[in-house]
Amino acid sequence: MSNDTKNVSRRDFVKGAATGLVAGAFAGMGMYSYSPWAYDRMPDVERKQHDFGSCRSVRITNISETSWFNNAHLIGDIHEAGGLLVNQYTLNWAPFGNGKGSAQGAYEEGIGSIKDLLPHDIEKAWEIQKKLSLHPENPGGYSCLIEVEALDGTIHKYLLDTGWSYSWMNDCFKREGIDQMLRDQEIEALFISHEHWDHFWGLPVTVKYDNRIPLYVHDGFYDEGLQYIKDCGYKGDLTIVDKPVTPIIPGMALLKFDVPIINRVFGETSLAFNIKDKGLVLISGCCHQGILKFADFAFANLKYDNDKFYGIYGGLHISPFEDWDPKYDDLVISLGQWGFERIGCNHCTGHLTAKKFIEAGYPVVRGTARFRSASKDYLGNGDKINFGC
Amino acid sequence: MDTSSFSYLESRKLVKRWNGPIPALINTFLILAFFYVTWWIFQDPRGLMRMYTPYVGYMVCRWLLIIFIWLAYIFDYWPFKRTWLNKTHPLIKGAVLTLVSVAAMVLLIKGFFVEILGNYGIAYFNPDRLIEMGITDFYSIEYAAEAIMMFAAIASWLAPSWVVACENAPWQKLGQPARGITIVVVTFFISMIVYFVTMHSHMAILFYPWQKYTAICPPYWEQFANTVSGNFHIAWIMCCTVVVWQFETIWERYPFNLIKNDTLRRVASFFGIIGIALALCFFLFYAQDLVWGETIRGTRRLMAPDWRWLHVGEMAIFWLLPTLYLNFYCGNWPTKFSRPVNVCIRTILTAAMAVVVYVIYYKTSHLFLGTQKGFSHPQQFPMIPMIWLINIFLINVWFMDGWPGWKAIPKTEEELAEVHEEIVASDVKWTPGIAKGLAVGVVAGLILYLVVINVLPWIGANVNIIK
């Protein structure tokens, strides 16, 4: 009898303990997880303060920020092909069109039609591709020239991205004198921010004028992208960026972000500059990692003057198709707290975002809306911005 | 015993056609094959209909889920007769009931939301209206689909809650279709209120300028959630959706079914589910902060609070999959211990399995589902394939009696009596032993929680799921 009582009591104890275990765990979750105490125990960010030197100034010339000319055509093509996850090389856009229609494109077939013409006859190559691809007049491209003045006064020139349409980018390069700078090998390197059509597919235009220009790409590039670099006739030093921070020259570093991007692209690289006595300038292609993540990474890893975020330039990837989402308002609301003194934005930042930035009173540098740029709310084609000059 | 007082699901018993794990293995194989074929046909961005845009596909699978719940749980299969359900081959039953659900879904989405609500009430439910006002076709469809989907997300928490927690009260004695219509109308109405309070402001600031004369802008949750995005509500609502099914399946409505008083039990169950869901929600958000670092308001993807809230819901749905699998295909294993011990083991087991499913999903989904690599891609919605798979579970178990691994036979009187045991349990009574165990268990649970939150930062620093 006493054993029975003990057994029953033990069984009851186990029943209670099993119930209590689950209840206790949930109680902990509910009462502690989102409380101030839970967040008090989070470790402070350990700043590595990597000293990458400093430079005197950075001047940016917007070669082209108009990556496409008609949002409806671009997003319509993507929609028709099956949405934002469809592999960009199958969308059937130039220069990888094969004439088979939406979502039926293939890298091999597309490049096969023009490979022999690259990079010496990009005009003819583009004409061929225009007949095979969807909305051939829509491509433009993103590219900018970055001129860095070192502390000793030396000027270093770099290209960030090389656009999309061969014909549009060729015209833009000529307009800004980039073609001659490339021929003269004045430009020290080409950085590709990411593998997307509008930043990378215009590579033959750069290669046409300088096929040995040092080239930097993110290590998330797919086989097609790496093959395209070869098929363009590129003969130079290709650097596959695989480190979070790659110093380029004093005051200039390439930062790598492993971020998934639409149309099966992975990874973005962006540039950071330390302007002496001013602070940090961040320059991006599309900034798929987000401008605040970009700034936060720099805050945690780099040493820069005055410990101050000074300026931004580039596509900030907020509303590239003039779409919107409440989460974008989080940026509009919070960006001011980061204290940037000059904001130069365009391209995938979206007109609506630029408009909201201006309404919020942020120091947005206005543009001239020339050369098919659509708004003076941001820096358009041919516009320039200086940091530290 | 009068079986008509029991629902079809309560009145049937599923028995294995073969011994051992063979039925589970065969069903799993067939379900996965059916999942992949239908995924390719309807959802896959590389497939035929490519509805994973993502919101169109998301809307469809959410509404299919809620209509399955309405049909099986709320309408008890009305207008189909019990004799038809008992005698018809599972394949035919599955096809007919699924097609009826699809038809109801199309009628509801196109008829009610797009045509009626979108034309005579709220413009953003109708994509054509948004297109006319100058919004890109693609985003017009996506915005409308998001709003319609979110309504289903709320309904798929409230509708089963009314059956599982509130036990259909006060209409439990009504016949069909009166009971079904009443509960659908009531839960639909409450869903609408919850929608207005949780999502309408989100939709209102989706447009420029903010529609502040028609909605609360900025929304009231801004400071607490650290975002103006309605994803904050997706987090706790998804947790409610998951917890209500855990309560019904692996927890066997324990411990609230120990409450004898009907009203008290129902109220405690309903709000208990919400309380547990909130606890889970806050934990899953905190877990992300521990692994990835604190959020940065205004940034994108992994570090953004809006995405972290969304990911709370996504993580919760990863827990629902093993929960339903254990219940449907593993006989709710284990069953040999006392109810509290069984519940405890199942909870820990399914949580562990959820972690495994999570890791497998993020490691492999981009290879075979057409999704993008990475946690936080804007089009990476694991809820879509998870719910698609869960829908197939439901078709298999609710509409096809678990065919081919299982078949339905009527329950005996003793077995029917056990249905009541589920509603009001009598196997756990308050004793000093229970009290002592409970106290020790609560402490152990708190320690377990502390261990987990101390291990998570180490996981964040040392484990890389996506390479």
Image (tube, coloured by chain):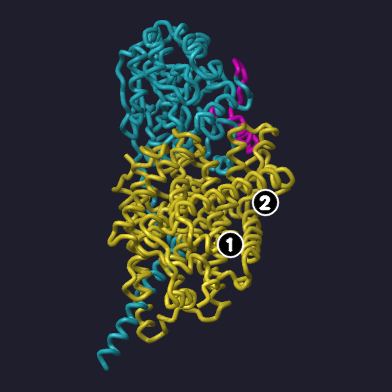
Chain colours: A cyan, B yellow
Residue A262 drawn at (x, y percent): 46, 33
Query: Looking at the picture, does residue A178 appear above or below residue A36?
Result: above
Q: Nearer the viewer, mark 2 or mark 1?
A: 1
In reply to whether residue A189 is colored magenta, the answer given is no
Residue A1 drawn at (x, y percent): 27, 94
Answer with the quarter of the image where residue A37 lies. bottom left
Q: Residue at x 35, y 77 (%)?
A: A15
Residue B210 drawn at (x, y percent): 67, 43
Label 2 chain ID: B
Query: Crowding near pointer 1: few (<14 within 10 Å), some, many (20+)?
Result: many
Identify which amino acid the numbered label 2 is placed on: Ile
Q: Are marks 2 and 1 on the same chain?
A: yes
Answer with the quarter of the image where residue A382 lies. top right
| Camera sees residue A176 | no
| Camera sees residue A43 | yes
Residue B78 drawn at (x, y percent): 59, 61
Which image quarter holds the C terminus of chain B?
top left
Q: Does residue A198 appear to the left or right of A242 in the view shown?
A: right
Region rendered in magenta: A344-372
Q: Residue at x 55, y 30 (%)?
A: A320
* Circles 2, 1 touching at the beta carbon (< 8 Å): no
Q: Label 2: state its secondary structure.
A: loop
Q: How many marks?
A: 2
Q: State which tag comes first along the sequence, 2 or 1.
A: 1
Identify which amino acid the numbered label 1 is placed on: Phe
Residue that badge 1 annotates: B75
Residue that badge 2 annotates: B216
Q: Label 1: state its secondary structure.
A: loop
Q: Does residue B443 appear to the left or right of B276 in the view shown?
A: left
